[in-house]
């Protein structure tokens, strides 16, 4: 028997990795296909900057083929008209196949995006399977409604699938974010065309294969890798797509609304950027706060939309808190992602690494001070690593306090009291998440109510489950992933009114 995934050493992972041949072709109508014009692009691993494989460069013609397959499957109905309990069975089998495929999926994810293998195994693949299983369970438990009418009428209010769902996703959590969309979309009987980010297409293609193997009918779940401006735009403009469910930057989120307006007024659900404040009062448990703050910004190398990137701390507690954050950070190992001891891996690609380093430089140029890290790391690997960084003395008007860095950089600002803390925390165009740390439950209650964010944590950070909705206020988007609330996004309501004599 092979060693359980979480007990393997780096050598074992490297040997296993050498046996995994990534599939780079699109997955359309139940089979792998090359781009129609034969186009490919290099998929580069951020671990060492080397080409991992070539991937189909899908363009409008390939998107047309995928949407046509999805539309045909939807109209002919093998999935939509299936008995709910059968749909549940297939989705549960899909979840089991994901679990059984953990080695391959985790290696694809780690090699494609540079995250530590232990996280790919125990967070990304595990949550991806849990998400499909969570939505599978709704298939035969959701009831529709009978409206209150007079005695000679019967008004049914039924939930119906929308049709073809286009899902466009980013590179930071490719498996998790894909299944947050694919799970409820399939549960409700829709067909899906998934467009993964060009930096991270491999696990999405594998998901397409596994869904089909589980019994999702061919054409019901298609995957079109390619560039945003090509495959993504063609999908978002497509007249036969009924909903675009998007996660990514606010800038591209705006384009989604424009594409919908220019095409068929398709629905658009957006999960966009964030600039999450961590608000710490002097009476808080500073050790617990330091742990939540360090992991809240350095997990996934800060490439997390709700990463706690702004620390807003009461002046009198700042020095003690920063010392505690330094202690926690010293225990977070930056290293090769296939080494099971590694807790912080690579950034997604060279341009992004340069962008993050540019933010650090801009903070320093604006007068902030590097209190920890600040430099590129492991350069000899050829990969794209940046140290866990703390910028102290940040002013609210600095670029590092206002813009999403999407890297391991914490911006530290001080305040005198509660009202100033709330004002500063809300002084951002984003509203994805926030956290408050205090021993006073009155303060916790007032501040958590006043903070504008889709999730507000109290004396904790990043605790979540499939049972709670996830998404943002303001420029962080609209609509929610996860929880039963996400299901509504993928349905339309139809009233069937019958009059009796
Ligand atoms: P991005 O917006 O550049 O790309 C996201 C997706 O959109 C990719 O698949 C990309 O190919 C596609 N795309 C790009 N340009 C397009 C265009 N013109 N037309 C159609 N599609 C296009 O984002 P990214 O760099 O991949 O990811 C990072 C961003 O995602 C960050 O801003 C982060 O905050 C955000 N994000 C948000 C959440 C959330 O749930 N709110 C979760 C994860 C990431």
Image (cartoon, rainbow, N blue to C red):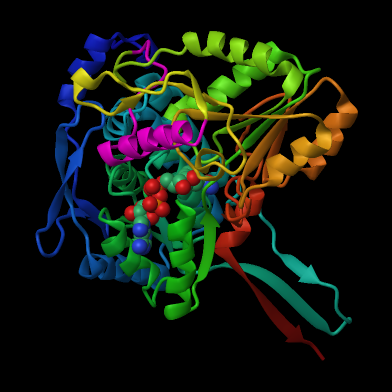
Magenta stretch bounds: 340-367
User: Which part of the image, by quadrant, shows the N terminus?
Assistant: top left
Residue in the image at 63% along x and 33% along y: 464
Q: Does residue 211 sit above or below 410 in this rendering?
A: below
Quadrant housing residue 241: bottom left
The part of the image, by quadrant, that contains residue 117 is top left
In the rendered view, does 393 fall on the left or right side of 174? Answer: right
- Viewer can see residue 353: yes
Q: Is residue 221 left or right of residue 400?
A: left
Residue drawn at x 21%, y 70% as measured from the top left: 61
In the image, 468 versus 187, the foreground residue is 468
Residue 482 at x, y = what percent? 59, 45
Q: Is residue 355 magenta?
A: yes
Task: Residue 19 in the image: state x and y as whole percent.
Answer: 16, 25
Residue plotted at (17% across, 35% down): 52
Do we see residue 90 in this rendering?
no
Q: Residue at x 34, y 50 (%)?
A: 196
Q: Is residue 63 magenta?
A: no
């Amino acid at each position: 028997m092979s060693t359980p995934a979480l007990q393997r050493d780096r050598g074992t992972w490297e040997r296993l990795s050498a046996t995994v041949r990534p599939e780079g072709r699109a997955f359309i109508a139940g089979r792998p296909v090359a781009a129609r014009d034969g186009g490919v692009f290099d998929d580069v691993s951020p671990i060492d900057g080397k080409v991992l494989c070539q991937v189909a460069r899908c363009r409008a013609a390939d998107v047309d083929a995928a949407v046509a397959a999805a539309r045909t499957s939807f109209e002919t109905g093998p999935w939509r008209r299936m008995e709910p309990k059968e749909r549940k069975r297939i989705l549960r089998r899909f979840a089991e196949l994901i679990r059984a495929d953990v080695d391959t999926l985790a290696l694809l994810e780690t090699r494609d995006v540079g995250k530590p293998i232990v996280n790919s195994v125990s967070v990304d693949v595990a949550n991806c399977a849990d998400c499909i299983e969570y939505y599978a369970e709704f298939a035969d438990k959701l009831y529709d409604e009978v409206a209150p009418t007079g005695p000679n009428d019967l008004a049914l209010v039924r939930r119906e699938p929308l049709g073809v769902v286009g899902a466009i996703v980013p590179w930071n959590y490719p498996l998790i974010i894909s299944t947050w969309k694919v799970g409820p979309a399939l549960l409700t009987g829709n067909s899906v065309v998934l467009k993964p980010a060009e930096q991270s297409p491999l696990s999405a293609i594998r998901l397409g294969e596994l869904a089909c193997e589980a019994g999702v009918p061919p054409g019901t779940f298609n995957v079109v890798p390619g560039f945003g401006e090509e495959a993504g735009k063609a999908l978002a403009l497509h007249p036969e797509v009924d909903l675009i469910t998007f996660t990514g930057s606010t800038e591209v989120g705006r384009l989604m609304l424009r594409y919908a307006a220019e095409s068929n007024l398709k629905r658009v659900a957006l999960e966009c950027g964030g600039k999450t404040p961590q608000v710490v009062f002097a009476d808080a448990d500073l050790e617990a706060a330091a742990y939540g703050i360090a992991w809240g910004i350095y997990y996934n190398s800060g490439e997390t939309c709700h990463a706690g990137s702004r620390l807003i701390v009461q002046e009198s507690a700042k020095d003690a808190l920063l010392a505690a954050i330094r202690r926690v950070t010293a225990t977070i190992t930056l290293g090769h992602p296939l080494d099971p001891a590694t807790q912080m891996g690579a950034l997604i690609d060279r341009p992004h690494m340069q962008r993050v380093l540019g933010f650090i430089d801009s903070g320093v140029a604006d007068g902030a001070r590097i209190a920890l890290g600040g430099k590129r790391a492991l350069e000899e690997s050829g990969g794209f690593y940046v140290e866990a960084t703390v910028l102290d003395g940040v002013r609210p008007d600095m670029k590092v306090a206002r813009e999403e860095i999407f890297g391991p950089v914490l911006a530290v600002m001080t305040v005198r009291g509660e009202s100033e803390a709330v004002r500063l925390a809300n002084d951002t165009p984003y509203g994805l998440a926030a956290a408050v740390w205090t021993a006073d439950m009155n303060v916790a209650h007032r501040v958590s109510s006043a903070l504008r964010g889709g999730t507000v944590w109290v004396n904790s950070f990043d605790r979540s489950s499939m049972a709670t909705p996830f998404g943002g206020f303001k420029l962080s988007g609209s609509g929610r992933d996860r929880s039963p609330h996400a299901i509504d996004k993928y349905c339309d309501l139809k009233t069937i009114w019958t009059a009796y004599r």
